Structure formats: C-alpha cells, structure tokens
Amino acid sequence: MIISRRLDVTSHASFDAHEQVVHFEDAALGLQAIIAVHNTQLGPSLGGCRIYPYARFDDALNDVLRLSRGMTYKSALAGLPLGGGKAVIIGNPHSIKSHDFMARFGEAVESLGGAYITAEDVGSAEEDMIAISSATSYVAGLPQIDPTSEGVAGNPSPVTAYGVYCGLKACAKHIFGSSDLKGRTIAIQGLGAVGYALAQYLVHEGAELVVADIHAAALERAEMEFGSAVTIGDVSTIHAQQVDIFAPCALGAGLNDVTIPEIKARIIGGAANNQLAESRHDMALTERGILYAPDYAINSGGITSVGYEYFDRTGRNPYAYPLTRARMNKHVEGIGQTLENIFQFATAQGIGTGAAANRLAEQIFRAGDSDQAKIATSGA
C-alpha cells in the first residue's frame, strides 16, 4: 500500500514557488519517492525519475527541487508546451528495482492526475518505464514498438547527445568563428549513455578527445572504438585539460570555486544537469573569458525526444506538422540558435550566460504562453 503526504517546503533553500511536492512511501516494497511539480503554466510538467542512494532525505529533497525547477526552464527554452517536474526514488537502482516496485511508483504518478509525466533519468531505463506504464499513462520514453520504424519513441540519450553536439558547434562558431569541430580538442567528463554518444559525433567530425570516467569498461570501449582520436584522462583533473572545449557529462556542481580557476578551455558545454555549484559561478566563468553554454539549454534534446514521444503516443500533437524523427531532429538542431540568442542577450545585458538563459526562459513560462514556447527555437 502506498502512502502519500504533501510536503511543506516553502522554507527550503531550493524552494522556488513549486506548485506541489509529494512524498510517497510503500514500506513493504521499500519504495520511498518524492515528486516535485515546479510549474505547469505551459502544460503538464515532464521530468525524469532519478533513482539514487541519497545519504539523507534532505539530499533527495534538495535534488528534486532543483531538478524540477530546471525542467521548467529547459522545456520553455526548448520550445515545448510543457512544464517542469521531477521524481527521485531513494535507493540503489541495482538492488531495489523490480516490476512491482516500479509499477507502484507508477501509481504515485497516476495519483497526481496528469500534473506530472515521468520519464527516464539516472538509475532508470526503458524497462522501468514499461513497468510504470502498467499503472499510469503519464509516462514518456517508452521504447519503439517497431524498432525498424522511424518513429519518435525510444531511448532519449542519443538525442540528448545530438543536441549537445549541435550546441557545441554553435559555441565554436561564436568563439572561433567557425562551427567546424575538426581538429578541435575536447575533454569529456563522463562516458555514460550521453557522453559516449557525444564522443561518437565528435570523433566522426574529426575532433581530438580527452575522456575520463569512473568505469574502466567505458574507457576501454572508447580506446577500442576511437583509437588515436582519444586520450584517457583522470577524473579528478579532466576539467583542467589544455583543450578548446570542456564537456561535463557526469553529475552536477562540477563548476565551482575549486575547478573554475583551473579550467583552460574557452568553451564549456555538456549534458550534465546543474553544472554550476552556485549561481554566482555563472559570472565567474564570464569574468575568466569562458563561454558557458547553460546546461538546460544545450542538453534539452532529451526532453524534446520524450516530449515528442508522449505527444505522439497520446495523440496530443501541439504542432502544425507530423511528429516524425526527422522533424524532431530539426527541432533539436534549434539548440544552436537558442544558444546564440542567449549569448547575444548576455552580452547586451552585461550578465552571465546562465542568467541570460534564465531571463529568456522566464519570459516564456511566466506568461504561460505555450505558442511562444513552441517557437522558442528556430527548429520548431
């Protein structure tokens, strides 16, 4: 039996006018989850289900509050008529999950009546979304029924990587005058599903990589596939490599008082969420002459992928064109123009690129203008 209670988080440091935050628990199954709905001005909130062994309950609460807020901003800048939400499940994903466990979490999602749509995130995968879908229709990221088709369903990680790749090309054009990444040196921190796919795009274009990951198998795979195009770096110093671009693709808060003075790259852009340890680090990067691609702007390919899949599967297409994979990829390519808009706005206002992205996103979602959200990128 699942028990739910709404949490009063108005005094929490990461509270940002969240619409609702609910704690769910099933003692028999060992389920302990938090779902945070940040904002639904543009549409129902959509955000992944993160499964992680948080040391403290407040660590989980802080994470879900920050991540759900970020999803609101991400969907707005991505040109999606969706709001921001997130779920976290406390526990080790390698030992706690089962079909019944995830289905019970699906019941928690269902109880919110469509205010929150869940999807994949750290610790969850397609098979988990299938289990969740047995208890609720408010789930995205389900696999393609026909794997040979060109539909929009399936694993969003490659789409996230493609968006980061497009974003890095826009950053290179802004800093170096050309979007061509051939011969550019790029350090990738984290070779998970997104980081590895990004590496494939970059190597294919002729970039030279330095990569680091805590898992030896990922590094061995990279050496085998990429050969001389890749050099193995150390996870503790990957940010300080003498490269053109640094791409954080692991966990967040990696841009902080310790790492920023050590960064030699001219550009930072990667798939990790919440890369800035504190908002003031945005301006710290600007003052050092480093172009920072705000994380939720450059890594929005994933939310676009699951958004398209959900719209298509539920018959809720908000666009004036059919939801094909080619059209979805064109939408994702709009990340480049979105970033250029952010960079120009930041320069004009004399602020950091992170603050610029926030202001542009707020102009969209605070007005509740879903039509403006749909044209926020040139690809939509």
Image: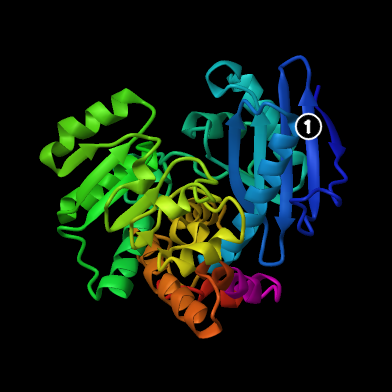
Name the dominant secondary structure of the magenta segment: helix
Q: Residue at x 53, y 45 (%)?
A: 252
Q: Residue at x 67, y 26 (%)?
A: 55
- Residue at the far bottom: name it: 348
The percent coordinates of residue 348 (x first, y second) are 50, 85
The percent coordinates of residue 310 (x first, y second) are 54, 51
95 and 372: which is toward the camera:
95
- Whether residue 162 is visible: no
Q: Residue at x 59, y 31 (%)?
A: 51
Decide if residue 12 is on the left or right side of residue 375.
right
Badge 1 marks a residue whose secondary structure is strand
- Whether residue 163 is visible: yes
The quadrant in which the N terminus is found is top right
Mark 1 sits on what residue? 24
268 and 331: which is toward the camera:
268
The percent coordinates of residue 16 (x first, y second) are 76, 58
Q: Is residue 2 above or below residue 238?
A: above
In the rendered image, residue 87 lying in the magenta stretch gets the answer no
- Location of residue 54 by image quarter: top right
Q: Is residue 232 above or below residue 158?
A: above
Decide if residue 35 is on the left or right side of residue 349.
right
The quadrant in which the C terminus is found is bottom left
Q: Amino acid at mark 1?
A: Phe
The percent coordinates of residue 142 (x first, y second) are 49, 40
- Residue at the far left: name it: 228
Colour scheme of the rendered structure: rainbow
In the rendered image, residue 367 lying in the magenta stretch gets the answer yes
Decide if residue 156 is on the left or right side of residue 67.
left
Q: Which residues are magenta?
A: 358-370
Q: Residue at x 61, y 74 (%)?
A: 359
Decide if residue 108 is on the left or right side of residue 374.
right
